[in-house]
Image (spheres, helix red, strand yellow):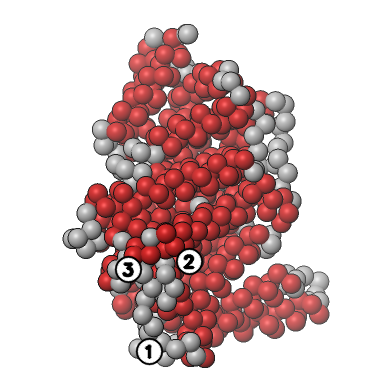
Amino acid sequence: MALPEYFAIGLFLLAIISLLAGFPVAFTLAGSALFVAAIASLTGAFEISLMGAIPSRIFGTAIWNEVLIAVPLFIFMGLMLERSRVAASLLENMGMLFGQLRGGLGISVFIVGALLAASTGIVGAAVVTMGLMALPTMLKHGYDPKLAAGAICASGTLGQIIPPSIVLIILGEQISNAYISSQSLIGNWSPEPVSVGDLFAGALIPGLLLVGLYMLYQVSIAIFKPDSSPALPPTASRDIRFIAKLLGALLAPVALMLAVLGSILMGIATPTEAASVGGVGAILLAGIADREKPAIWIYMSAVSFPILLFVAHSLDLRIDPAGISGETLLGLSLAVPLIAILITGIGNSLFRLLNSGILKEVCQLTMQMSSMVFVILIGATLFSLVFRGLGGDDIVYEALKDLPGGKYGALFVVMLVIFVLGFFLDFVEITFVVVPIVAPVLLLMDVNPVWLGVLIAMNLQTSFLTPPFGFALFYLRRVAPPEITTGMIYKGVFPFVLIQLSALAILAAFPALATWLPETFLGSRY
């Protein structure tokens, strides 16, 4: 093995050890890369002129990249929805609907978790919200504390795999770059890039499969261990008022989910455009949540919003200097008043949120979380450049291609490494450090990029549940009552980790679960 390759291995080990030691991720990636590059250049093992590509890479990936604009938009949407009491209303009504069945409250938790995941995509907010609302109710009605804690942690992490998901956005960018690199190596200089919309569509069925497995487990526990999941006493009659209240609770998250995901799947909007739609919808829902003041303009703007999107998609609103056509005139006559209503409603909602302090808090948290992601991206860009400049990608390729089982053996080893790293590292670190190294190699072996991306996303989801550093465990520990110990939480999530691994195995055995929707609705062929 040549000297540069020893430096490449040393760089990777130095980064992993520094991360495990608790150093900040972004500065660890950039610092270890600069340190190893400086030493390697003194020995002639690294060409220091390669560092001149860093400014253009950062400018291209973090500033001019339209896809990554969706990250702060989806973060804003999720945080704003957390303040709009959507989860509280959903859980209350789902509990009334299913609670009188054994295990019904647990089923309600998974349904609400799936709807929150499809509306927000933020794990921390979902786990904390569910822990504050659902956990005391489940304990009060005699649910096994371990089962209750595990169910809340598992349902809260569904935002990692059910789109819109921050993980899928970041992962989509990495998979796309890896796919373009692998195609250029085999002589295809104009490959069709892998879009975030492809991963959104690909992850939808596996995400719903995981929800179904969670619910099947809850039903099985309720059958074989009835004392662990008792039924709730009757609290209300199933009259027309209950049905109206249930539909009202479901309307907001389902409408927002259809607006965001439906516009992507139908090809009406890009993920970034859909994220902006979600952000506007979240502002309106948060404004409606303030029930002390009349919200007629907000309701009107909420109705005008989808109508305006339909008009913009159906009619040509462009004004030709030579004259206005009848279609354009009709479109403008409809669009202008709708825009006026929408602006009025958004302004009304923003004014309420500003007075309540919610807008300031959400904007600050959005800035903090977005800054973290982009600073890590810059550090990972520097790390990747140095690692490849030292020939690290060649080492990985040679190691994986010689494994028994061909591409399936290589894929199994990569999934195993990501799963083990998930015990110690966050999904952002794994996505930015490991995926750019292993993904090009797997894609050179003719692995479908959408299938690979969804497999990695589902694998990364387990990192939120696996001790000792599973973030969902710490989120729940922070809000759980004193009688729920850390040991109970660890024991409670163990069956759900096994369920996730089972879902991962099913997805590995049946790639069409991830590839059918992108091929059918988006026409993706890889």
Query: Earlier along the polypeptide chain: callout 1 or callout 3?
Result: 3
Q: Please, what is the three-letter code of the amino acid marked with disc 3?
A: Met
Which element type, helix, strand or loop, lies under badge 3?
helix
Q: Of 469 and 378, which appears nearest the observer? A: 469
Residue at the (69%, 60%) spot, across then down: 267
Residue type pointed to by label 1 = Lys
**What amino acid is labelled 2 in the image?**
Ile
Q: Position of residue 487 (x, y in %)?
A: 24, 49
The residue tagged 3 is 138
Q: Residue at x 46, y 39 (%)?
A: 431
Q: Are marks 2 and 3 in contact (CB under 8 Å)?
A: no
Of labels 2 and 1, the one closer to you: 2
Q: Which mark is residue 111?
A: 2
Which residue is disc 1 drawn over? 293
Q: For residue 30, which quarter of the picture?
A: top left
- Does residue 26 lie above or below 398 as drawn? below
